[in-house]
Amino acid sequence: MTAPERPQLPPEPARTAQRQLERGCRRLLALYPARHRRVHEEEMVGVLLASAHDGQRRLAPRDAADLIVGAARIWLRRAGRLRHPDGAAALALLSVLAPVLLCAEAVANSGLLGIVWVGCGGFVPPWIRLPNLVAISLLHGPGFWLLTAAGPVTLGLALCGLRRTAAFAALLLAGAGAATASPVPTGVQYASDPLVAITLCTSVVAAAALLLSDGPARGLRMFRRPAITLAGAAALTLAVLGLGACFEIQIGGHLYSALYLIGDTGVIHRSGLDAAELSAVAGIAILVVAAARSLRSAVGRRVLLLLALPALPYLLPELWRLALADPSLPQWLSPFLPLVNLISLVLFLAAALLAALVPLPPAWRLRRPRWHEEGNR
Amino acid sequence: MSDKSLQEPTFLILTALAAGAQHGYGIMTDVQRISSGRVRLRAGTLYAALDRLCGDGMVEFDREEVVDARLRRYYRLTADGAERLAAEVGRMRANATVAATRLGLAGGTA
């Protein structure tokens, strides 16, 4: 670096204008990534001041817009080529886990396996209650079955190596299911329906992971410890079966307990419910421990973040509804529920965008830019 | 190396740096001069392009100096950048030759 030259100071009014212009420049430069600012902020300020005419106090609108667009370009480019290999690994893992979760959601929401579980645990062989299962299937519309099919179809295609087909199948089935299962004119009300909202959002996450990752084959190779994998699958099964039995299901606008559909005596009902609750609690406890353990690794944290996305559009309206159920809260808040649904949807879309921007190619494909090191010397 | 043709601002930035290392403001004024005032790069566009070109290995940091209490960072063309610019010049020349030939044929020589 050459020795600094003695600056030639302009007269006071010009200096004041220049300081004002510089503050404006720095406010806009704050939009740039920190690393970019560290390397380029001072020279960009210099260039902007050099381009300004004498006495200019504010950036020209076109220069300001150009800085904003430039910041957006740099953010998008960096997001599109994040270099950390953990991201690629997380996406590959997610391309297996998200379709599995899609299956689990379908099962839990249908309540079918819950009934089977209660039947087995509650001393009633499931085939005895087969007419009830048929009744459920008849009561549900085609939208329900499209949503339910999304999981198994997506997982099957993904495991066959047809990941693009699997991704489009997930979006198509869940989208068509959501459209036919919930013909609500506002278009945002679906967020309050757990089956539709969570399945739809999980299918978006699954499709993104399938399209952007190296594929489920790589994800499967990452399951290096079969015992842990089996324990995880068992925990998920316990949780899903238990929840499927405990939760009520919605048919034709009416809520039914999955256990109610067994149509059995109170003794069997209570035993089945106990078994279901126990299995749900045990499964969830194991999953929570697994989640806590996975927080230790960067891959695990990313997978957890992405898997948590589908819960967003459901949790917020539900929490709001619970809050409204509190009699101490003013009831005039209730008309704002659609707004909460909308916020929830926007949050999900923002999170989905974030997830879509995590397409991390393997590190070996990318060249590390040289100027960062040089610029930081 | 990419076969995709360079966008005009990128082409002009590489052309400006082909004559030697320049700082940001120098590149902006040079691009305006090269394009006869037709293309005026602004700071946001210039530094987004430099960020990309540095990332692609076509441009690299050369040196920095402080003038009037302001930092100036100089950039230079890399061998890859020069090769890419030469390939683009060849492609443009070939296209221009074909276009000129066809115009000559279409317009007639009489």
Image: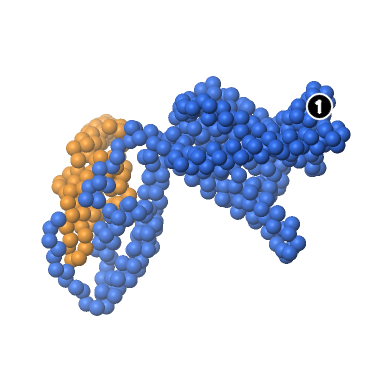
Chain colours: A blue, B orange
**Secondary structure beneath label 1:** loop
What is the chain letter for disc 1?
A
State whether residue A170 appears in this view.
no
Q: Residue lying furthest right in this view?
A: A265
Q: Residue furthest bottom?
A: A12
Residue B44 place in picture, x, y as percent: 33, 54
Q: Nearer the viewer, residue A91 or B87?
A: A91
- The answer to which quarter of the image holds residue A26 is bottom left
Q: Nearer the viewer, residue A166 or A303?
A: A303
Q: As drawn, is A290 to the left or to the right of B83?
A: right
Occupied quadrant, residue B79: top left
Residue occupying image coordinates x 28% and y 61%: A45
Q: Considering only vertical position in the picture, is A109 above or below A192? A: above
Residue A39 visible: yes
Q: Residue at x 61, y 33 (%)?
A: A235
The residue depicted at 58 percent of the width and 38 percent of the height is A287
- Where is residue A138? Give x, y as percent: 80, 30
Residue A110 drawn above or below residue A35: above
Instruction: Please name the residue shown 20% across and 65% down the image.
Output: B69
| Tag 1: amino acid | Val
Judge whether A337 appears above or below A121 on screen: below
